[in-house]
Amino acid sequence: MKIMVAEYAVGKGGGKLVAEGKAMLTTLKNGFYELGHEVIYPEAVTDFGVAVDKLSKESDAGVVIAPDDMLCEFTKLLESNTVNLGCSSDSVKICADKKQTIKVLSEGGIQVPRIVSKEEVASEQRYVKKPRYGCASENVFIQKGKDICPTPDHIITEFIDGEDISSSVIIGKFSVLPLTINKQFIRVDGERLRYGGGLVPYSVEQEAESEIMRMSEKVVTLLHCEGYVGIDFILGDDGSAHVVEVNPRPTTSIVGIAKVLNYNVADLILRAKFGSLPMPNEVKTEGSFIFELS
């Protein structure tokens, strides 16, 4: 099988996310190689969309990794030409819209940070300001109410204190397979949040682990996700978890997961689309892996 893996930062040939992009691309590429498949991918191209369109026509299946606000467009190109190994463009469209995601999850009974209107903002209270459409921790700020300048392309949510963690899951036709819970290294640079890597897997209390995995399964069901998905949480000291982001694509955690999991992650992605996934009790990790960004 010929498989296209189109990673945006590598495809464009640079940018501040190129280290993460190259690591994810290499992980998936090597995983598919191990299974005997051919892998093609765009690299340093002028027009990423044109490259996705061309290469997907030459492929039997493919997956796109791109900033959430662009991912829907590229996923539609992929879907028009070959088998999409990831979330559908309809699912991606919802996940990319943070306001809509919060609405769908809240109505489905998932704990999420509440969106705050500008009229509700209190001067000395801390809030999170993030782009309505955007990628992970890019341009996310923690600010006091008096310092917030509301804009139409941002949302303001309540600030939830706790640990930054994520879950990684794979969604097949008939089941959802939890992979790992991961620690995210998020630092505060002034008011801005910056992602610095992570630890895979990350151990939490058994009760919290069960709750995070239960929530993860419900989240991907509500959003009609497929393939590999990463879900970002804030885990409070009391064990309560809030979903703060849903990434409808492979995330940086896949790099560590591939190192510690007793299954080839690329194989699981293919099985999610074309076959059946193993039972959760068959999936195990050994050791840990830290991925740090400079």
Image (cartoon, grey):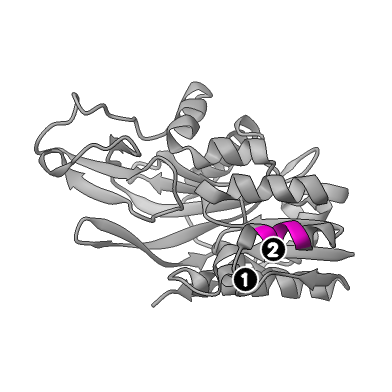
Left or right of 40? Residue 25 is left
In terms of sequence position, does the residue under pointer 1 or pointer 2 come before the other? Answer: 1
Residue placed at 85% from the left, 62% from the top?
58
Residue 1 in view of the camera: yes
Q: Which mark is residue 247?
A: none
* Residue type for callout 1: Val
Residue placed at 65% from the left, 33% from the top?
221
Residue placed at 55% from the left, 63% from the top?
253
Q: Which residue is mark 1?
A: 45
* Residue type for callout 2: Ala
Q: Which residue is mark 2?
A: 51
SS state under label 2: helix
Residue 106, percent across and down? 46, 26
Q: Mark 1 packing: few (<14 Cα in 10 Å), some, or many (20+)?
A: some
Residue 247, percent across and down? 54, 49
Tags 1 and 2 in contact by the CB under 8 Å rule? yes
The residue positioned farthest toward the top in the image shown: 107
Q: Main secondary structure of the magenta part?
A: helix
The answer to whether 60 is drawn above or below residue 119 in the figure is: below
Left or right of 71? Residue 155 is left
The residue positioned farthest toward the bottom in the image shown: 294
Residue placed at 55% from the left, 74% from the top?
13
The stretch in magenta equals 50-54
Residue 225, percent across and down? 66, 40
Quadrant of residue 129 within the rendered picture: top left
